[in-house]
């Protein structure tokens, strides 16, 4: 079988993925794709693509072409953004008539680990195009950077939208959990994952990341360029998601603000607190999704439309489904006890949780729940219809992909932000990344950010770790199988 070349990819120095293509595009345009195609042929197609949208004033040149073989561990845009045409590792070709077969005699079929094989320059060389959005970087591609500045920083907000809206911010990308858990073909499990962690592990950031995912999906499914997520990871799930699915993020800490504290309260007090809570979070939902609801958004005076039943009626009429996210699920149950807790469970079931359990897989497409540990107890799990719809993954190895940092992630984030000054961090603390003797170590995100912020500010590593040691929480995985 002769070598095949259709997967050979070409790009333009200083330009993003919009100006990169593989030879299948050439085959489509010219009816052939074989080793006889020259660098001059490819430059002609790139010029046509380039002239459509770019105003840098240059023409793609075949006079100097680099054989680069950029690896796919990072996003292509990130690789292009950091590309250095003077790097001595790259082979420079100065013959526009050189053929693909001359350069790649064995072809490039199936080499999907390579993002880019050939890099073309423009003549004259213009300024690099501005890069925006989130870039996937790092040795393993698990660190993200928000483009737009050369200044390096770490997250200071627990809201994902704020994190990715701040240029220069570096963070660990947790969106892989989406494609692993919620891809309907790879994982048809409709149960709602539940993760319990103490404060500071990044539960709220993860919940707001889920909310942002659906907002990005709905706003960008036509353009397919979501700036809040690394494009390839977003795309892995994007086309499999049911369209018109909105995220309903409900924070039970807000309910605590409505509840009377103590153990012996009248049912009416608890019912009023839950009713006011639902009115508040549903009003927030309508405000967040005003762009989709338009004139159908209910007025605040419409009490029924500020119940979950009313919300469901409206969204189903408009053709929407929900992805339900509950943050701080255990907070109200740590706040009250006794008969008050019984009344609380009854009202939450009646006004919200019962709908989720009944509609999961239908109007409720999927969901996610997180909270602090509550002595091994999951509120409302005594109701069989709810217990069957949830899965506690707090101690599963894969839950590290959602909340908390592995040792590997701490080291990679430190290397991306602090460079050489973080070289000895891996030796400065213990921890294992894979189940070892039935245990797994996870680090609180807040503590990691604090330590790395001090390192970024120039504090000596030994002083930082003596003041604020990075001590992991060891999770027991002995009751789970390693898949």
Image (cartoon, helix red, strand yellow):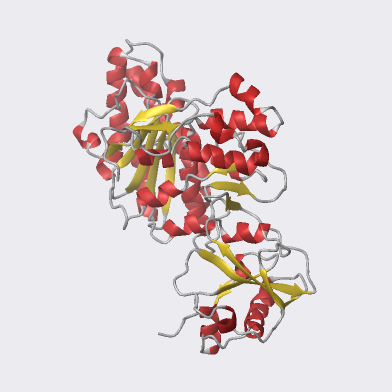
Position of 58 compared to 41: left or right? right
* Residue 116 vertical position relative to residue 284 in the rendered view, above or below: below
Position of 207 compared to 334: left or right? right
Q: Nearer the viewer, residue 92 or 336?
A: 92
> Is residue 288 in view?
yes
Q: Residue at image x 67%, y 66%?
A: 15
Image spot of residue 53 (x, y percent):
68, 72
Image spot of residue 19 (x, y percent):
63, 70
Q: Residue at image x 49%, y 53%?
A: 292
Q: Quadrant of residue 468?
A: top right
* Residue 202 vertical position relative to residue 366 in the rendered view, above or below: above
* Residue 13 vertical position relative to residue 297 in the rendered view, above or below: below
Image spot of residue 353 (x, y percent):
31, 34
Position of 376 compared to 124: left or right? left
Image spot of residue 389 (x, y percent):
25, 40
Q: Nearer the viewer, residue 468 or 273?
A: 468
Q: Nearer the viewer, residue 407 or 378?
A: 407
Q: Quadrant of the N terminus?
A: bottom left
Furthest toward the right, the residue is 124
Q: Quadrant of residue 223?
A: bottom right
Number of numbered discs overlaid on the protein picture = 0
Q: Residue at image x 22%, y 27%?
A: 382
> Is residue 300 in view?
no
Position of 383 compared to 224: left or right? left
């Amino acid at each position: 079988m002769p070598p095949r070349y259709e997967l050979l990819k070409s790009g333009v120095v200083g330009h993003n993925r919009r100006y990169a293509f593989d030879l299948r595009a050439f085959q489509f345009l010219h009816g052939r794709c074989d080793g006889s195609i020259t660098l001059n042929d490819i430059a002609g197609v790139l010029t046509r693509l380039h002239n459509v949208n770019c105003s840098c004033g240059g023409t793609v040149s075949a006079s100097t072409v680099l054989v680069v073989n950029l690896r796919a561990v990072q996003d292509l845009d990130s690789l292009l953004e950091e590309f250095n045409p003077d790097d001595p590792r790259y082979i420079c070709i100065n013959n526009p008539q050189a053929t693909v077969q001359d350069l790649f005699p064995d072809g490039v079929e199936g080499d999907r680990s390579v993002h880019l094989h050939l890099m073309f320059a423009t003549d004259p060389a213009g300024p690099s195009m501005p890069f925006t959005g989130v870039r996937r970087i790092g040795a393993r591609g698990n660190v993200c950077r928000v483009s737009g500045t050369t200044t390096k920083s770490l997250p200071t907000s627990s809201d994902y939208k704020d994190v990715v809206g701040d240029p220069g911010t570096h963070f660990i990308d947790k969106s892989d959990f989406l494609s692993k858990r919620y891809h309907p073909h790879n994982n048809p499990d409709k149960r709602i994952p539940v993760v319990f962690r103490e404060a500071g592990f990044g539960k709220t950031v993860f919940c707001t990341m889920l909310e942002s995912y659906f907002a990005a999906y709905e706003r960008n499914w036509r353009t397919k360029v979501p700036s809040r997520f690394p494009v390839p990871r977003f795309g892995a799930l994007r086309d499999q998601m049911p369209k018109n699915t909105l995220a309903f993020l409900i924070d039970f800490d807000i309910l605590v603000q409505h509840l009377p504290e103590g153990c012996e309260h009248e049912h009416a007090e608890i019912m009023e607190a839950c009713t006011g809570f639902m009115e508040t979070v549903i009003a927030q939902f309508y405000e967040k999704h005003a762009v989709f609801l338009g004139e159908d958004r209910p007025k605040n005076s419409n009490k029924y439309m500020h119940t979950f039943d009313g919300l469901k009626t409206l969204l189903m009429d408009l053709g929407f489904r929900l992805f339900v996210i509950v943050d701080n699920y255990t907070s109200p149950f740590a706040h009250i006890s006794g008969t008050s807790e019984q009344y609380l469970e009854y009202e939450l079931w009646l006004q919200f949780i019962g709908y989720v359990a009944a509609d999961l897989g239908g109007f409720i497409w999927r969901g996610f729940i997180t909270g602090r540990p509550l002595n091994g107890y999951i509120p409302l799990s005594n109701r069989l219809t709810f217990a069957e719809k949830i899965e506690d993954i707090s101690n599963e190895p894969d839950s590290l992909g959602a909340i908390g940092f592995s040792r590997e992630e701490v080291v990679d984030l430190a290397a991306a932000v602090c460079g050489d000054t973080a070289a000895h961090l891996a030796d400065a603390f213990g921890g294992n990344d894979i189940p070892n003797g039935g245990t797994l170590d996870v680090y609180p995100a807040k503590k990691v950010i604090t330590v790395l912020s001090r390192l970024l500010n120039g504090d000596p590593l030994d002083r930082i770790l003596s003041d604020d040691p990075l001590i992991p929480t060891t999770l027991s995985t002995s009751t789970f199988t390693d898949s």
